[in-house]
């Protein structure tokens, strides 16, 4: 897989475009975001190492595989990341979970940190989840924190990305894999993705004005 990958899949594309629509209410938005979290997990984890094992079925022994080493860690960038987190944990139910709280300064577009609560990350595979990769400032701030703990690998899972955000992230963390459902056209003057889907946190929690 390339460092930045847009997943070409008909269900993922359809669910993403339904997220975009102003006809999608809060309940459906939550459900679609959760389902996208589930659907993107195989692509975000396909690099994880495995160990060969022997499995005893009811009829015979067979060769199998299990994930090697510690369970993955999922880190949610608050608050919108929790919409993907719920879906990811439906698949990676034994994963440890961390949270990084970041708020956007609407004048500078920089990320302001207000919470960090992380499990042990050293030598573990980490999936950071946030639906939007816009300017990339929040993603870089979160990844700076994660990188301090010396993880084995880091993957950022998002739904919609802007080229500017992808470039900003790559310039700061070229080693981080990015899995996205869509790469949109650009940012507007306020730093929001076009065509995008609005503010994912507001739509997820019904606080949109």
Image: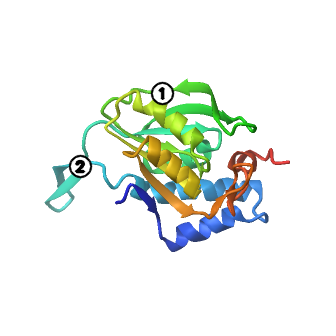
Does 175 sit left or right of 81 as displayed?
A: left
User: Gap between marks 1 and 2, in whole Å?
Assistant: 25 Å
Residue at the spot 75% in from the left edge and 46% down from the top edge: 202
Number of disc labels: 2
Q: Position of residue 42 (x, y in %)?
A: 40, 57
| Residue at disc 2, secondary structure | strand
- State the residue position of label 2: 50
Local packing at callout 1 (Cα closer than 10 Å; few below 14, some 14-19, many 20+) is: some
Proximity of marks 1 and 2: CB atoms separated by less than 8 Å: no
Residue at the spot 48% in from the left edge and 27% down from the top edge: 118
Q: Which of marks 1 and 2 is nearer the N terminus?
A: 2
Relative height, residue 122 to residue 42 (above, below): above
Q: Nearer the viewer, residue 200 or 56?
A: 200
Q: Position of residue 26 (x, y in %)?
A: 75, 54
Residue extending farthest to the right is 209
Residue 118 tag number? 1
Q: Position of residue 151 (x, y in %)?
A: 35, 34
| Residue 89 appears anywhere in the view | no
Picture quadrant of residue 70: top left
| Residue 189 appears anywhere in the view | yes
Q: Position of residue 105 (x, y in %)?
A: 71, 35
| Residue at disc 1, secondary structure | loop
Residue 59 tag number? none
Local packing at callout 2 (Cα closer than 10 Å; few below 14, some 14-19, many 20+) is: few
Picture quadrant of residue 103: top right
Residue extending farthest to the bottom is 10
Which quadrant does the N terminus fall into? bottom left
Relative height, residue 6 to residue 178 (above, below): below
Of the two numbered discs 1 and 2 in the rendering, the one whose residue sits closer to the viewer: 1
């Amino acid at each position: 897989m390339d460092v930045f990958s847009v997943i070409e899949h008909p269900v993922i594309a359809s669910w993403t475009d339904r997220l975009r629509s102003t006809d999608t209410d809060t309940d459906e938005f939550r459900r679609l975001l959760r389902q996208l979290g589930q659907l993107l997990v195989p692509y975000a984890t396909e690099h994880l190492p495995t160990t060969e094992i022997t499995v005893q079925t009811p009829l015979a022994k067979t060769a199998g595989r299990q994930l090697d080493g510690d369970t993955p860690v999922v880190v949610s960038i608050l608050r919108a990341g929790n919409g993907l987190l719920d879906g990811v944990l439906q698949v990676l139910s034994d994963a440890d979970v961390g949270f990084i709280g970041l708020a956007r300064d609407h004048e500078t577009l920089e990320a302001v940190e207000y919470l960090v609560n992380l499990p042990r990350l050293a030598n573990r595979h980490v999936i950071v989840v946030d639906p939007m990769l816009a300017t990339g400032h929040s993603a870089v701030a979160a990844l700076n924190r994660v990188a301090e703990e010396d993880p084995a690998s880091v993957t950022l899972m998002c739904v919609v990305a802007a080229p500017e955000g992808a470039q900003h992230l790559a310039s700061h963390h070229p080693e981080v894999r990015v899995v996205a459902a869509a790469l949109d056209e650009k940012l507007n003057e306020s730093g929001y993705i076009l065509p995008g889907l609005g503010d994912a946190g507001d739509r997820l929690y019904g606080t949109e004005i």
